[in-house]
Image: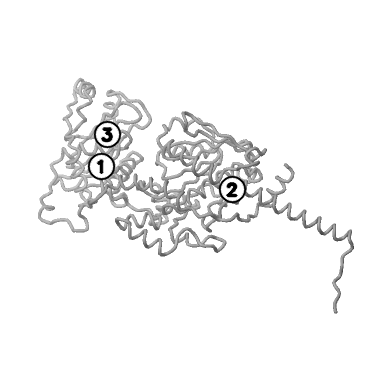
């Protein structure tokens, strides 16, 4: 018979004390992790982890709806604002002070902050008052304005509709954008980040058909690709079947198939399920393809070609800038090329300024016909006093849009790939949606182009004899316009995100020991 070995009473007490100490430490570490949900609150998908840990200067995540792309961005933003041990590596010789987080508008930013940031990811409990993780919020008229961390970093909330002038005096070390950022806003942001060697992050479902982001995410050739050094990835719902720890994800193949069956078109499936960059079906100029309708640069039209001009004097301000188009048309009027353009972005212009700009653009041209928006009375007066005769534009929007789509669809109209202003026209044509708010839409060059093309006696006889192929016929949604679909989609995304989130256990991470040491010292 084997006898049980009995420990001396003193050793037994020591072992019991050690077990109690270990249990206390385990409970304390668990409590610490529960107070830092941006690090330990939810299990990552593998693609989320890669995005979270990327230190590339640009990070682009084009993804399906309701899969956790915003969560990955928010968690990274909070982490970088509080992980002081990373700052020397991220910003050598600098101390970060300002991050921007950009949402479509203030209402969305406030809802996201209240329902997602605070509820799921912000430091809580004792951590809310900690020397590094501690934070406070600032609001303006009820809308969230910024988060101030005790680490010294402030996260300032910006919106897509914000005037670019409001971005021009800031020093910013990191920018995080939720939803597709307007191209002109990115241009201003890139200058701000260049000064600090800062970082740009954008998570989005492609909906605006902007050429910059198409070339960044889904380029056809290496020469066409924008931002080749960026961390960029397209994520589908099928990438969310399993978390990185092997546990089931939010989606199953059966659930994905049901979602696909509810989509109204293949384009919607590609965008909402597979996270692809797809062309909008509800675009005003649906026949325009930015990859097909740019031609070789043209300085002056060939001999015999006629020049037509379209002038939109605009409102004289920065929200509705003035625009001028010069269109060259071949003698049979079967082919046209837009070869000069100007849009007065960010500057105040008078009717006199616009007329002088027109004179500058047309100085070496013989203009056959020039049309202007006749609501600008001062422009007509100034031009006539200078001995220049302008004709009133045909402003029938529906007919002008139909003519432009016919021209593009049949290869009769291109844009000379000559300069930035001509590229602006391409962006307008590619992104303007049907039913869009006129006051917020960039359509100034498109309006000037409408005025010019409607002055031309185009030869459509050949088209009348040879109908366009069925595949080239204009697509017309039967139920909802794409703009309406987009509005509904954003609503569903914001609402559904919170309803379907599964509870996950806290995860381990490589930085846990450093946090434990810091917290143990603090307490």
Residue at 24% across / 36% down in the picture? 448
Q: Secondary structure under badge 1?
A: strand
Residue tagged 3: 324
Q: Earlier in the sequence, mark 1 or mark 3?
A: 3
Q: Earlier in the sequence, mark 1 or mark 2?
A: 2
Query: Left or right: where does residue 60 sit relative to residue 152?
Result: left
Residue tagged 1: 338
- The Cα atoms of the two marked residues, 1 and 3, are separated by 11 Å
Residue 271 vertical position relative to residue 147 in the rendered view, above or below? below
Residue tagged 2: 37
Residue 85: x, y in percent?
Answer: 66, 45
Residue 228: x, y in percent?
Answer: 47, 52
* Quadrant in which the C terminus is drawn: top right
Q: Nearer the viewer, residue 47 or 194?
A: 47
Question: Most extreme residue toward the bottom, as rendered?
Answer: 1
Residue 406 vertical position relative to residue 251 in the rendered view, above or below? above
- Which of the 4 image quarters holds residue 456? top left
Query: Left or right: where does residue 329 sit relative to residue 498?
Result: left
Question: Most extreme residue toward the front, as rendered?
Answer: 1
Residue 360 vertical position relative to residue 507 in the rendered view, above or below? above
Contact between marks 2 and 3 (CB within 8 A): the answer is no
Question: How is the structure coloured here?
Answer: one colour
The crowding category of the residue bearing disc 1, from other C-alpha atoms within 10 Å (few below 14, some 14 to 19, many at least 20), is many
Residue at 26% across / 39% down in the picture? 446
- Which of the 4 image quarters holds residue 8? bottom right
The crowding category of the residue bearing disc 2, from other C-alpha atoms within 10 Å (few below 14, some 14 to 19, many at least 20), is many
Q: Nearer the viewer, mark 2 or mark 3?
A: 2
Residue 445: x, y in percent?
Answer: 28, 37
Q: Earlier in the sequence, mark 2 or mark 3?
A: 2
* Quadrant in which the N terminus is drawn: bottom right
Q: Secondary structure under badge 2?
A: helix
Q: Nearer the viewer, mark 1 or mark 2?
A: 2
């Amino acid at each position: 018979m084997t006898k049980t070995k009995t420990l001396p009473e003193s050793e037994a007490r020591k072992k019991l004390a050690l077990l109690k100490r270990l249990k206390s430490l385990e409970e304390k570490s668990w409590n610490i992790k529960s107070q830092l949900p941006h690090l330990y609150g939810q299990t990552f998908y593998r693609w989320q982890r890669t995005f979270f840990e990327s230190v590339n200067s640009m990070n682009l995540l084009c993804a399906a709806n309701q899969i956790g792309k915003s969560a990955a961005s928010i968690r990274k933003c909070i982490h970088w604002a509080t992980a002081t041990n990373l700052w020397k590596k991220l910003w050598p010789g600098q101390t970060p002070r300002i991050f921007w987080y950009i949402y479509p508008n203030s209402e969305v930013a406030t809802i996201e902050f209240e329902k997602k940031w605070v509820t799921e990811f912000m430091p809580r409990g004792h951590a809310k008052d900690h020397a590094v993780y501690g934070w406070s919020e600032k609001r303006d008229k009820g809308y969230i304005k910024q988060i101030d961390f005790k680490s010294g970093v402030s996260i300032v909330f910006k919106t897509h509709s914000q005037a670019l002038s409001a971005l021009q005096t800031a020093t910013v070390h990191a920018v995080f954008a939720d939803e597709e950022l307007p191209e002109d806003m990115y241009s201003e942001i890139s200058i701000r980040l260049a000064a600090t060697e800062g970082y740009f992050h954008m998570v989005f479902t492609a909906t605006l058909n902007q050429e910059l982001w198409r070339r960044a995410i889904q380029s056809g050739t290496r020469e066409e690709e924008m931002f080749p050094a960026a961390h960029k990835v397209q994520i589908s719902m099928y990438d969310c079947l399993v978390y990185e720890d092997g546990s089931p994800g939010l989606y199953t193949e059966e659930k994905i198939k049901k979602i696909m069956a509810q989509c109204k078109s293949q384009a919607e499936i590609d965008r909402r399920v597979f996270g692809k960059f797809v062309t909008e079906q509800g675009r005003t100029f649906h026949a325009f393809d930015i990859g097909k309708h740019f031609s070789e640069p043209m300085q002056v039209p060939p001999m015999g070609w006629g020049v037509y001009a379209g002038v939109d004097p605009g409102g004289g301000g920065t929200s509705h800038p003035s625009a001028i188009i010069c269109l060259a048309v071949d003698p049979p009027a079967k082919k046209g090329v837009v070869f000069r353009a100007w849009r007065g972005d960010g500057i105040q212009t008078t009717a006199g300024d616009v007329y002088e700009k027109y004179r500058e653009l047309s100085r070496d041209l013989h203009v056959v016909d020039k049309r202007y928006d006749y609501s600008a009375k001062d422009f007509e007066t100034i031009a006539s006093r200078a001995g220049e005769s302008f004709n009133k534009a045909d402003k029938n929007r529906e007919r002008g849009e139909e003519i432009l789509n016919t021209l593009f669809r049949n290869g009769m109209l291109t844009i000379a790939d000559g300069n930035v202003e001509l590229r602006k026209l391409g962006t307008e044509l590619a992104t303007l949606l049907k039913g869009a708010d006129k006051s917020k839409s960039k359509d100034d060059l498109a309006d000037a182009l409408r005025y010019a093309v409607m002055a031309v006696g185009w030869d459509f006889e050949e088209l009348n004899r040879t109908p366009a192929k069925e595949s080239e016929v204009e697509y017309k949604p039967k139920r909802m316009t794409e703009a309406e679909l987009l509005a509904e989609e954003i609503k569903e995304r914001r609402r559904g995100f919170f309803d379907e989130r599964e509870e996950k256990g806290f995860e381990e991470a490589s930085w846990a020991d450093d946090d434990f040491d810091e917290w143990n010292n603090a307490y």
